[in-house]
Image: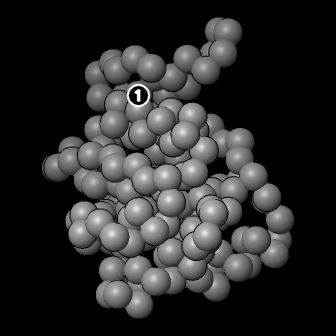
Amino acid sequence: MHLRSRSCILRPGRNQVVHTPPPPQHSRHVVILVEDDEGLRVALLRLLRACGFDACGYASAEALLDDPRAARADCLVVDVHLPAISGLELVARLRRRGLQVPAVAISAHDEAGVREAARGHGVERFLGKPFLGKTLIGTVNELIAGR
């Protein structure tokens, strides 16, 4: 990943350059990512940080629920299918605790039933894997701007 003039430029493959929207300029927003796949978690954290976010990553819902930093979040990005507590149940539990932060669900199972379940748990956006980095960054920026 390369950073050039407040736009994140990704080079995911041969001759591909993808420009993503710049991060909000007024402050570093906190994005919390919960993804059990370590490789994907590391890649998404790098992307979020390169695009100006203060990003924290967790391998499980339980790890986030035990961490008081959840209260600082400006946006959540959660994998739907996590071991033990699902990403959707995580969002519901955080909402019951009073954390009304926008959430993006990500899943390799991009089916109508999964999308409906995500909406039913209070998730604002759904991204089916694989997705482009610019799509995630644009979605996060949109949700933060709409708060």
Residue 56 position (above or below residue 5): below
Q: Nearer the viewer, residue 80 or 143?
A: 80
In the image, 145: left or right of 40?
Answer: left
Measured as percent of width and height from the top left, residue 31 is found at: 35, 54
In the image, 84: left or right of 95?
Answer: right
Residue depicted at 41% across the width and 32% down the height: 46
Q: Nearer the viewer, residue 91 or 10?
A: 91
Measured as percent of width and height from the top left, residue 87 is found at: 57, 68
Q: Which residue is the site of mark 1? A: 8
Q: Residue furthest bottom?
A: 96
**Crowding near pointer 1: few (<14 within 10 Å), some, many (20+)?**
many
Residue depicted at 29% across the width and 22% down the height: 5
Measured as percent of width and height from the top left, residue 64 is found at: 39, 65
Q: Is residue 36 visible?
A: yes
Measured as percent of width and height from the top left, residue 94 is found at: 41, 80
**As shown in the figure, which amino acid type bears the numbered disc 1?**
Cys
* Quarter placement of the N terminus: top left
Q: Nearer the viewer, residue 129 or 124?
A: 129
